[in-house]
Amino acid sequence: MITNDASHPIAVLGAGSWGTALAIHLSRAGHDVLLWGNEPEHIQQLIEQRSNQQFLPDVAFPEKLQLTADLEQALAFPAWILIAIPSHAYRAFLRSNAHLFADDIGIAWASKGLEQGTGKLIHQVVTEELSNRHKLAVMSGPTFAKEVAVNLPTAITVASESNEFAEQLSGFLHSGRFRVYRSSDMIGVELGGSIKNVLAIAAGAADGLGFGANTRAALITRGLAEMMRLGEAMGGHKETFMGLAGMGDLILTCTDNQSRNRRTGLLIAQGKTLEQVHEEIGQAIEGLKTAREVHELAKKHNVDLPICEQVYRVLYEDYPINEAVHTLLSRASSQETI
């Protein structure tokens, strides 16, 4: 049974916008939280300012939120661990620090994306690097860090193969304006949170080209169909993609400019290079890396993903964005299927 008191705080790993927002939420809900970041100067700044002005300006830290740049301290006696580092960094991080994770500790993560070069889901990476000694869970859904940090109403999905662990995490997270739904479909929840970033780039590009609301609605709907096709081929459940971690997150990232992936599409439509996009966004853009992995997964599982395919071609094959649009629009009429 996981516990939470001053001697066993929740360890949140990753002091970016999302990790900080979740640490704020958990501590605001009355839990002791120790937030770790890998940059000592940044952590010292957070300690002094009692806020994360870089990512969440003007949101004060609750009293129960403490900080450290010492990973060994963060992992010494945690109640459980919540990881919120970029998805591409998981394997290297876990491989370097596996000896610090207690054998029986529960581990959850709030990162979204696929491993570069393998297309593996995060739970697969965690299992390979930490073995099967831990109870694992993923949390995902339509969530912007800023809105969680300022306590706006939010709903997420927590998925775990352990119903006991999912219930325990729900008990910690479900508070006030933060509602938690449980699932056993880790594959579906992780894939939904990954593929939606690729589709958000497409939606941003469409809006950047001035295609309007009709196009956006069609793109989201057909994008959801692509998500479901690949998800089912990989073992996810269709109903998962109709929920918060699928359709909910897809709608959010495709329609609001708080989404870094949507803003990426807007910038690409303006003719910006990927280097310029990275410079302007200033944070990790998971959809750029995920587009390549989704392309390979579609080939591996023989699944047709026309929207994701055109995003990949524009990003990695220098395919003109107007030609990509023409390719999509010139596809033969067909029966609407999922």
Image (cartoon, rainbow, N blue to C red):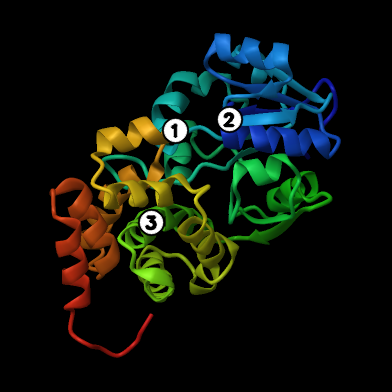
Going by the numbered disc 3, the residue's amino acid type is Gly
Residue 326, located in which quarter of the rendered image?
bottom left
What residue did someone put label 1 on? 283
Going by the numbered disc 2, the residue's amino acid type is Phe
Figure check: 267 above or below 82: below
Q: Are marks 2 and 1 in contact (CB under 8 Å)?
A: yes
Residue 284 visible, this orientation: yes
Q: Residue at x 67, y 38 (%)?
A: 22
Precedes in sequence: disc 3 or disc 2: 2
Q: Residue at x 72, y 52 (%)?
A: 164
What residue did someone put label 2 on? 55
Taking the image as shown, residue 15 lies to the left or right of residue 322, namely: right
Residue 267 image point, x, y percent: 33, 46
Q: Secondary structure at mark 3?
A: helix
Figure check: 163 above or below 219: above
What residue did someone put label 3 on? 204
Q: Residues within 10 Å of mark 3 (few under 14, many from 20)?
A: many
Residue 334 image point, x, y percent: 25, 88
Going by the numbered disc 1, the residue's amino acid type is Gln
Q: Residue at x 30, y 55 (%)?
A: 294
Residue at the bottom extreme of this rendering = 335
Taking the image as shown, residue 71 lies to the left or right of residue 63, namely: left
